Amino acid sequence: VQLQASGGGLVQAGGSLRLSCAASGRTFSLRHMGWFRQAPGKEREFVAAISRSGGRSIKADSVKDRFTVSRDNAKNMVYLHMNNLEPADTAVYYCAADRAIMADRGLFTTPSEYIHWGQGTQVTVSS
């Protein structure tokens, strides 16, 4: 699976953005997908994950009430809808594909459980 994230940009605090992740390859719909972010000088951190079917999702506590993750398997797309953005959300955002295909397993928050990564898209929130 090859992934390409887009949709980042500069936004004022309180604003919204929708990140998109376009996937190529035949196994996209067979894998859980995740979103991570990395701010300068910090480790990559989990943001959200969504199951193969889109029926289950989990989010980090810091974004739980503001971000929503969704996917469209017919279009090979995953989205991260971000509302009420804060300066602390400033980071490069990455989409990632779970390392397992069609596995009966849960949604993971650790980067090591994801094998395919997009190139990242920059989100900058000004105060």
Image (cartoon, helix red, strand yellow):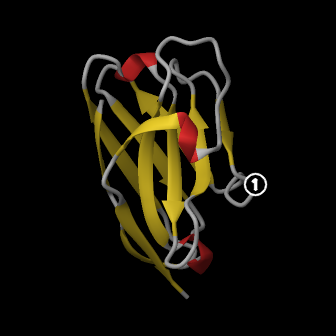
Q: Residue furthest left?
A: 24
The spot of residue 15 in percent (x, y) is 51, 71
Which of the two residues, 51 or 25, is positioned nearer the viewer here? 25
Q: Please state if 93 lies on the left or on the right of 47 as rendered.
A: left
- Rendered residue at 52%/53% (across/down): 36
Q: Which residue is mark 1?
A: 61
- Rendered residue at 50%/11% (across/down): 102
- Rendered residue at 33%/58% (across/down): 7
Q: Residue furthest right?
A: 61
The spot of residue 72 in percent (x, y) is 39, 27
Element type where label 1 sits in the image? loop
Where's the N terminus, which quadrant?
top left
In the rendered image, the vertical position of residue 127 relative to residue 5, given as above or below: below
- Rendered residue at 71%/54% (across/down): 65
Which of the two residues, 94 or 50, is positioned nearer the viewer here? 94
The spot of residue 67 in percent (x, y) is 60, 52
The spot of residue 93 in percent (x, y) is 44, 59
Where's the C terminus, which quadrant?
bottom right
Q: Please state if 86 lies on the left or on the right of 61 as rendered.
A: left
User: How many numbered badges does the structure rendering display?
Assistant: 1
In the rendered image, the vertical position of residue 58 relative to residue 121, given as above or below: above
Amino acid type for the residue under numbered disc 1: Asp
Q: Residue furthest front?
A: 112
Which of the two residues, 20 or 44, is positioned nearer the viewer here? 44
Q: Please state if 92 lies on the left or on the right of 75 as rendered.
A: right
User: Callout 1: few (<14), some (14-19), or many (20+) C-alpha neighbours within 10 Å?
Assistant: few
Q: Please state if 24 lies on the left or on the right of 18 as rendered.
A: left
